[in-house]
Amino acid sequence: MPIDRRALLGSLAVAAAPLPPLDKAAPAPPVPSSETIPLWPNFPPGSPVALPDTRLKRVPAGAHREYQLKGVAMPAIHVYRPAVANGIGLIVMPGGGYAYLSVENEGSRIADWYTRHGYTVFVLNYRLPGEGWTNRADAPLQDAQRAIRIVRARAATWQVDPAKVGVIGFSAGGHAAASLATMAGESLYEAIDAADRLPTRPAFVGLLYAVTTMQPFATHSVSRLNLLGPNPSAALVLRRSPVDHVGKDTPPCFLVHALDDGTVPADCSIDWMAACRKAGVPVEAHLIEHGGHGFGLHLPDTNPGSLWPEMFLRWTNRHIA
């Protein structure tokens, strides 16, 4: 179902209540953004008494460096503005198995690529569920819902069309993106300001080697454990398995997965594609022979999968024109 532009613009007219200010004290990403906007004006929902300590660490990642962020005490969006905005907003959700955030490989580098093509990019530092939050299974999705609402509420500031805000998620971040795409009607927190009247359904969704289910033996066990904790109920597993909630209102989806991915089974994307086709949701899938997991923008030019950023760009432009 397309976004109703008139209804959205009408709701934006009442979204004038003050939003969280620029947070100059937030940890800087490896590639600095122009602005950092905290999601919550006070403490996030379900905050523990002692917030986690923020840690940004450089670690080896094959032949490439990688920065991992842990201890997301105050979730935020890092804003990357293009030289000339084309009106499209892209929220980027890094992966990391819900144990850390891959803030460079699947965050700032992605932002840099798409801002060079006119997109206004928002890298989301969402909470990691195992860091003491009382609502661990809901925390990442709460942050994703709040993030897209803030982007829409401030769309004019960033020269973004509020009806052209999409998401792209990687690995566990893909699970958060897939959940946002399928659970737009799920109320997960009490409204804070007028921005929370805005819709959470993205205009389009990119899923890169994404975790799309929490069913045992069908997904990434680390992501499942970190999100749901040990021994989750069958009802919780089903609620947090977005592939089981794909329906006619799910936005158009773009998938990339390597068949030799030893971390997140390619079946996660294959099953998502099948669910989209059954529901009549536009879907495009690229299953590459080699690439492993977590490749971001690092695939060699000899690998056809290295073309995925350009393919996603063309696909997105076609679906939101």
Image (spheres, rainbow, N blue to C red):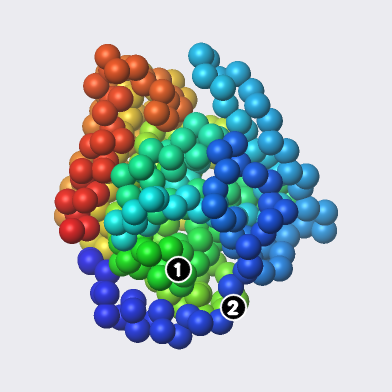
In the displayed structure, 92 sits above or below 181; it is above
Residue occupying the point 26% across, 36% down? 310
Q: Is residue 255 left or right of residue 278?
A: right
Q: Which residue in the structure is indicated by mark 2?
A: 18
Q: Quadrant of residue 190?
A: bottom right
**In the picture provided, is 166 more to the left or to the right than 76?**
left
User: Residue type at mark 1?
Assistant: Thr
User: Considering the image in quadrants, where does the N terminus appear?
Assistant: bottom left
> At 38% across and 38% down in the image, what residue appears?
113
Tell me the tag on residue 157. 1
Which mark, residue 245? Answer: none
Q: Secondary structure at mark 2?
A: loop
Residue density around tag 2, few if under 14, some if 14–19, many if 20 or more, within 10 Å: few
Quarter of the figure that contains the C terminus = bottom left
Residue 278: percent from the left, percent from the top? 19, 50
Task: Give the image location of residue 183, x and y in percent.
Answer: 41, 61
Residue 224 found in image quarter: top right
In the image, residue 301 above or below residue 49: above
